[in-house]
Image (cartoon, coloured by chain):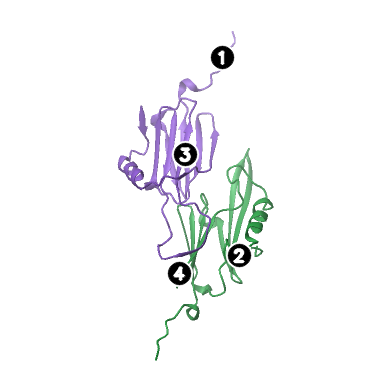
């Protein structure tokens, strides 16, 4: 889903609307995974963009991360047993991370139910100090 | 009477000193089986070391300290994750076998097994 493109959560007037669509039209729910959404933080420093997502109770193989056209998508599948029937739930979030990412060096870590993705910025996009001659 | 399941008094003292005022009630689910209740609590960011479970009288208290991934020099672009630590109080209205309570946390999901004591289990009564 590359529909959600917001630079900052506070300045983009459509981010709330995207969130609403994601949350209410996202698909089936169960009681425990009562939201199809999961909370995401994004940070930046000179070297990288960092995206952190809370996804408790998944295994690594149930998580998919994709970087496509400056948008990072995190997708997760949860299987839940409901009255003997197995259902699977899909959760997904997309975050615009900008096109300055060195896609070959993206790293992801999943620990204690928290997924953190490090997206290094391409060399030529990093801030440089310029000496005055 | 109080039973500290995790038997980590030191841990608890640490929790008390580092815990901010505000706590977050984690989402949870309780299912009942024939012999035990299963409590699942979503606590992303909590490791085994940051967890404390205590049973006092009929109250099960679950506390979790959330480790931070964020480094101080990272500038936030947007933040949706609540930084508060977790606290969940559950009133148990069934007698539980305290010694047999089991708990494990994996990938930020805590599972507590509360075995129902023999006297609290339903009994079939034979009709003469």
Q: Which residue is mark 3?
A: B88
Depth order, front residue of A9/A55: A9
Q: Which residue is mark 4?
A: A45
Q: Quadrant of residue A70?
A: bottom right
Rounded to the nearest whole Å, what is the CA distance between mark 3 and mark 2? 34 Å
Disc 2 marks which residue?
A6
Judge whether B70 appears above or below B46 on screen: below
- The picture quadrant where one finds residue B5 is top left
Task: Give the numbered dot on residue B125.
Answer: 1
Give x and y (percent) for residue A118: 48, 66
Q: Residue at x 44, y 81 (%)?
A: A128
Distance from the alpha carbon under mark 1 to that under mark 4: 69 Å
Q: Nearer the viewer, residue B92 or B80?
A: B80
If the image is split into quadrants, where does the N terminus of chain A sit?
bottom right
**Callout 1 secondary element:** loop
Please say if the residues under marks 3 and 4 sit with CB atoms less than 8 Å apart: no
Q: Colour of chain A?
A: green
């Amino acid at each position: 889903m590359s529909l959600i493109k917001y630079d900052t959560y506070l300045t983009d007037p459509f981010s709330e609307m995207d969130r609403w669509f994601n949350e209410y039209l996202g698909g089936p729910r169960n009681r425990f995974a009562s939201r199809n959404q999961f909370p995401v933080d994004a940070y930046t420093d000179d070297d990288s963009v960092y995206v952190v997502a809370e996804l408790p109770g998944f295994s690594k193989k149930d998580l998919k991360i994709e970087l496509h056209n400056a948008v990072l998508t995190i997708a997760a599948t949860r299987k839940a047993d409901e009255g003997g029937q197995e259902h699977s739930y899909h959760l997904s979030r997309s975050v615009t991370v900008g096109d300055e990412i060195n896609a070959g060096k993206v790293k992801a870590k999943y620990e204690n139910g928290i997924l953190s993705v490090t997206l290094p910025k391409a060399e030529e996009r990093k801030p440089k100090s310029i000496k005055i001659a | 009477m109080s039973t500290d399941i995790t038997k980590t008094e030191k841990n608890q003292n640490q929790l008390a000193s580092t815990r901010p005022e505000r706590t977050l009630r984690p989402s949870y689910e309780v299912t009942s089986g024939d012999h035990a209740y299963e409590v699942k609590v979503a606590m992303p960011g909590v490791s085994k070391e940051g967890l404390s479970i205590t049973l006092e009288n009929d109250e099960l208290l679950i506390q979790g300290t959330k480790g931070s991934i964020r480094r101080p020099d990272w500038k936030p672009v947007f933040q949706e994750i609540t930084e508060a630590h977790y606290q969940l109080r559950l009133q148990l209205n069934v007698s539980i076998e305290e010694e047999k309570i089991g708990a494990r946390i994996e990938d930020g999901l805590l599972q507590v097994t509360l075995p129902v004591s023999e006297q609290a289990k339903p009994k079939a009564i034979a009709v003469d």
